[in-house]
Amino acid sequence: MQAWLPLFPLQVVLLPGAELPLHIFEERYKEMIGEVLRDRIEFGVVLAGDQGLAGAGCTAVIDRVLREYPDGRLDILTKGRRRFEIMSLNEDRPFLRGEVEYFDDEDSAGPAAGEDFRVRAIAGYNELRALSSDAPLPPSDVYHPQLSFRLARPVQDLSLRQILLSSRSEADRLKQLAEFLPAFLVRQQRVERVKQLAPRNGHGGKVSGIE
């Protein structure tokens, strides 16, 4: 039984089902990941910010080792699995560990709950993907029980991702996304427009037509 969960504080919010590539170079994390690989256990990814560690995180499993370096560094690909709350911390080892409680959603509403938010969140996701010429959401995923985590993957806003991770309601997460994505999409459209027009602006000044 895994008494203490090894913790990896990062400027990242890992969501269940999402992939996260990591380059392991610090000695303490070489040790931690070595144990994770040896014992085939999970480790926790938790957001580290100016205010310290977030109260909730997501476990990661190592999908595969991409590269091993002669000095012990590793490139690994991980995948988000279970959400947890940190109850206490332990610093007896070189790396941080936590006593955690795992949690899942508490609402039991069916697919019809929050249908308007679902439709709007999917539409926003598809528009966002179209900016990068990526494929829209597959029809088979529309009623996934945790669709919100799938829709949030392209959104690298740490505050929103942490709110979604901590929420125990799929309906609430879809509402959060439906309300967040329109303004986020406008910002991303401006970013893409600047990328397209900036090469024409050789003197480095403001690009005409961009507010």
Image: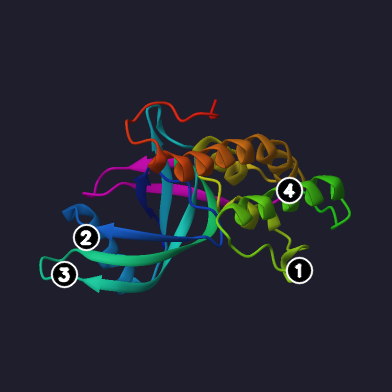
Q: Split into 4 quadrants, where in the image is the N terminus?
A: bottom left
Give the quarter of the image for residue 82: bottom right
Asked if residue 62 lies left or right of residue 169, the reply is: left
Residue at the limit of the structure toward the left, as seen here = 71
**Which amino acid type is shown beneath numbered disc 3?**
Tyr
Asked if residue 87 lies left or right of residue 6, the reply is: right
How far is the residue under mark 2 from the one under mark 3?
11 Å
Report the residue marked by disc 2.
30
Q: Earlier in the sequence, mark 2 or mark 3?
A: 2
Q: Earlier in the sequence, mark 4 or mark 1?
A: 4
Category of crowding for the residue at label 3, using alpha-carbon neighbours closer than 10 angstroms: few (below 14), some (14–19), many (at least 20): few
Q: Is residue 186 a member of the stretch shown in magenta? A: no
Q: Earlier in the sequence, mark 1 or mark 3?
A: 3
Q: Residue at x 68, y 55 (%)?
A: 126
Closer-to-camera residue (83/11): 11
Asked if residue 183 lies left or right of residue 1, the reply is: right
**Which amino acid type is shown beneath numbered disc 2?**
Lys
Q: Considering the numbered disc 1 on the image, is that residue within a helix, a strand or a loop?
A: helix
Q: Residue at x 54, y 53 (%)?
A: 15
How far is the residue under mark 2 from the one under mark 1?
41 Å
**Which amino acid type is shown beneath numbered disc 4?**
Ala
Q: Considering the numbered disc 4 on the image, is that residue within a helix, a strand or a loop?
A: helix
Q: Position of residue 83 (x, y in %)?
A: 55, 52
Numbered disc in front, either 4 or 2: 4
Report the residue marked by disc 4.
121
Q: Point out the stretch of residues depicted in magenta.
A: 88-106
How far is the residue under mark 4 from the one under mark 2?
39 Å
Q: Residue at x 24, y 46 (%)?
A: 92
Q: Position of residue 79 (x, y in %)?
A: 47, 64
Q: Earlier in the sequence, mark 2 or mark 1?
A: 2
Q: Considering the numbered disc 3 on the image, is that residue within a helix, a strand or a loop?
A: loop
Report the residue marked by disc 1.
139
